[in-house]
Image (cartoon, helix red, strand yellow):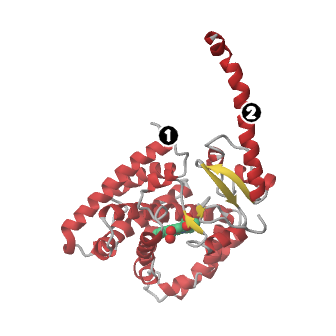
Amino acid sequence: MSGFIIDELPLLLLPALVALFFYVNVVRWKRMKRLNLPPAGSGWPFIGDTFAYLKPHLATSTGLFMEQHISRYGKIYRSNLFGEPTIVSADAGLNRFILQNEGKLFQCSYPKSIGGILGKWSMLVQVGEMHTEMRMISLNFMSNVRLRSHLLPEVERHTLLVLRSWRENSPFSAQEEAKKFTFNLMAKNIMSMDPCEPETEKLRLEYITFMKGVVSAPLNFPGTPYWKALRSRSKILRVIKQKMEERIQEKSERQEGAEDLLGWSLKESKLSKEQILDLLLSLLFAGHETSSMALALVIFFLESCPKAVRQLREEHSEIDRKKQRGEAALNWEDYKQMEFTRCVINETLRLGNVVRFVHRKVLQDLQYKGS
Ligand code: HEM
């Protein structure tokens, strides 16, 4: 008798499991219908559409996944990303509404994997008071006064360094050069690291591995981009930590240090060492990856627009002509005259896809245009 039950058990269990599966799905479908949620595609259990969503694509497009989903479901659709039910919006009106209601109806919330790489004290992970404090520090770093006094001369110095390194008739990758330029600029402003130093170059190469993992599938197995990025994170933090210790020991002796972000955070903020480490790592990422991509896109778009190149040349030649004889360095007044240059940058940011997505958590049920 007991032998009969064991033999027949799989046969009895199978229909029961199938019935349960359909029951759960019907209940879920009815609930979704009642909630009037945006339409959804079918994804894999748990991982959902994460891999298709993260698939690399040209920065001049929104990628195949977005294009296909938008044409099938519209600009607002449901998906499952990073193990969470998600609503994806490519709708400018809804996106504006979300950002305008930051902290009220929505809250910044990135997948755990991003927190693992950028650190638990990263600005993209923190909310509330700590986020506000870190934002103040970052704003101070990019303040109008600092832009005029420090950043503009540094931008010019680093630009000239890059331009002078080019050899006539030898090809180079505009994207690589843009990355080198922005990394060196950020490393100088954050930790006073000089572009020609071997340790700056070593840190830059480590950052390349690090960045490949930030926007990758969160698979922490040996050999994956995510795993490699976590290892790079530790190595980068070791360098920043060493700089921090040196700075603490040297303290008042070093004048230059107080002018970079590391010096400023140590002197003026109440942040712990661990918090400063994550802040610096995140800012190096935020400022470098985005600006270098934007720069590379400017070059890419300009290639097919000789009229714009001509106009840019004229604008810059005119600024150069107006400068006093012997006065070489660019100043704030020169920068303000770069009106067409600003149009080129704005148009590039409109056409190019520099930051592929931002993540927000909804804090309460809400309706937008009836859904
Ligand atoms: C073309 C250049 C850039 C683009 C397209 C860009 C894009 C963005 C976007 C979309 C966000 C919002 C992320 C979110 O709220 O979820 C952001 C945040 C941020 N960016 Fe940039 N960024 C650029 C350059 C920079 C630079 C040069 C720096 C600093 C050196 C910087 C520092 C930051 C910081 C600190 C945040 C966090 C702000 C906060 O959470 O309050 N960004 N950026």
Residue at (62% x, 82% y) in the render: 339
Amino acid type at mark 2 = Ala
- The quarter holding residue 98 reads bottom right
Number of residue marks: 2
Is residue 358 left or right of 124 when viewed as pictured? right
- Look at discs 2 and 1 and give the one toward the viewer: 2
Which residue occupies 64% across, 73% down? 346
Q: Quadrant of residue 188?
A: bottom left
Q: Residue 194 location, x and y as percent?
A: 34, 64
Look at the picture and state if 297 lies above or below 66.
below
Residue picked out by circle 2: 19
Of 239 and 340, nearer the camera is 239
Query: From this viewpoint, which residue is outermost toward the right?
Result: 72
In the rendered view of the protein, which quadrant contains the N terminus?
top right
- Is the C terminus in the top left, top right, bottom left or bottom right quadrant? bottom right
Nearer-the-camera pick, 261 or 278: 278
* Secondary structure under the numbered disc 2 in the rendered image: helix
The image position of residue 113, as x and y in percent, is: 50, 50
Q: Which residue is mark 1?
A: 224
Q: From the top left corner, tell me how far across and down residue 176 is, in percent.
A: 51, 55
Q: Residue at x 45, y 74 (%)?
A: 132
Is 59 or 121 nearer to us in this picture?
A: 121
Left or right side of 194 for 104: right
Q: Residue at x 53, y 82 (%)?
A: 335
